[in-house]
Image (tube, grey):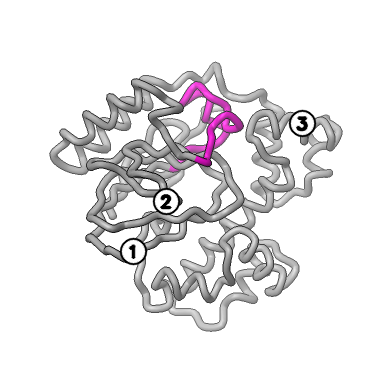
Amino acid sequence: MVVAGRLPPGVTSMVGYQSAPDPGGVHRGLPSSKLVFIVSRDDGVCTDGLPPNPVVLGGMHTEASTVLTPVAQAGVQLAVHPLASRAVFGLPTSDIVSSTFSGLDQLGSRAARLHQRMTETSDWSESFDLLHADLVAAWNPDLLPRPEIVRAWRLLERGWSVASTAREVGFSERRLQTLFRAEFGCSPRTVAQLMRFERATALIRRSIMDGAQGFLADVAARAGYADQPHLTREFRRFAGLAPTAWMREEGWLHGEFANVQAAEAVDGELSRA
């Protein structure tokens, strides 16, 4: 993996990947509170049994997807903040369909041009520059959500309850839920649960890299779960299996970090506000 040193606005990470061919390789793509945007340097990524997809665009979703690696694959994967979806893609997160993950269907000629130019790049620096220039050119801060929605998202990130968040931004819980579903396609409660799940997976990764033992109870407490069984229940809900089984499947118990989701996120700017 190669991590970009500079990021376009609205992007929280940009990682170049190149996998070896693995006829039986299946990677579990975890749910995330971020949007996934992948531009391939080849024929594309195979997700959920669909044909190769040269440009992947996925919104927020609560179920794991499967990514097949029957042949060597290369490309650049970006995590885009849902608050920036309109400013980057001209679409609210709620309009980005994760059932097909097709950027060509959702972004049209822009995605097709990006893929064509990506296949012509000679190195990672050129690939990153191409995407950086495209996203900077597309960026329209006038399309960012209303300030109350941005504030509510930030509070949920900090672990505030939905009720406290609604009161703080001056909305009823029902009004906040309506606005979140319209903007993100998910309720504030689901968004908060996805954020907590991501905190847990990041803490698990860091614990393994630090050589810690028996760390799941500590991860549960630090991520905001009531206890380790609570963590396990939500892990099964979002990942489809228990944390230990997921770590074993990914090879993390042996210190391997081969997939793109294992990359350390690099914070990008959403706005100056």
Please tell me the numbered disc located at residue 126: none
- Residue at x 55%, y 52% (from the top left corner): 31
Q: Quadrant of the N terminus?
A: bottom left
Determine the CA span between mark 2 and mark 3.
Answer: 33 Å
Residue underneath mark 2? 49
Q: Amino acid at mark 1?
A: Gly
Q: Is residue 203 magenta?
A: no
Secondary structure beneath dot 3 equals helix
Residue that badge 1 annotates: 25
Question: Dot 3 corresponds to which residue?
Answer: 178
Measure the C-alpha gap from mark 1 to mark 3.
40 Å
Residue at the spot x=21%, y=29% of the render?
A: 117
* Mark 2 secondary-structure assignment: loop
Extent of the magenta region: 79-99
Which comes before the other along the chain, label 2 or label 1?
Answer: 1
Instruction: Mark 2 and mark 1 in contact? Answer it, CB < 8 Å.
Output: no
Query: Crowding at label 3, few (<14), some or many (≥20) Cα neighbours within 10 Å?
Result: some
Q: CA distance from mark 2 to mark 1?
A: 13 Å
The residue positioned 57% from the left and 77% from the top of the image is 215
Q: Earlier in the sequence, mark 2 or mark 3?
A: 2
In the image as oriented, which residue stretches furthest toward the top?
142
Q: Residues within 10 Å of mark 1 (few under 14, many from 20)?
A: few
Q: Residues within 10 Å of mark 2 (few under 14, many from 20)?
A: few
- Name the spot of residue 225 as percent of width and height, x first: 71, 65
Instruction: Say above or below: 146 vs 79.
Output: above
- The quarter holding residue 185 reads top right
* In the depicted structure, whether residue 3 falls above or below residue 270: below
Mark 3: amino acid:
Thr
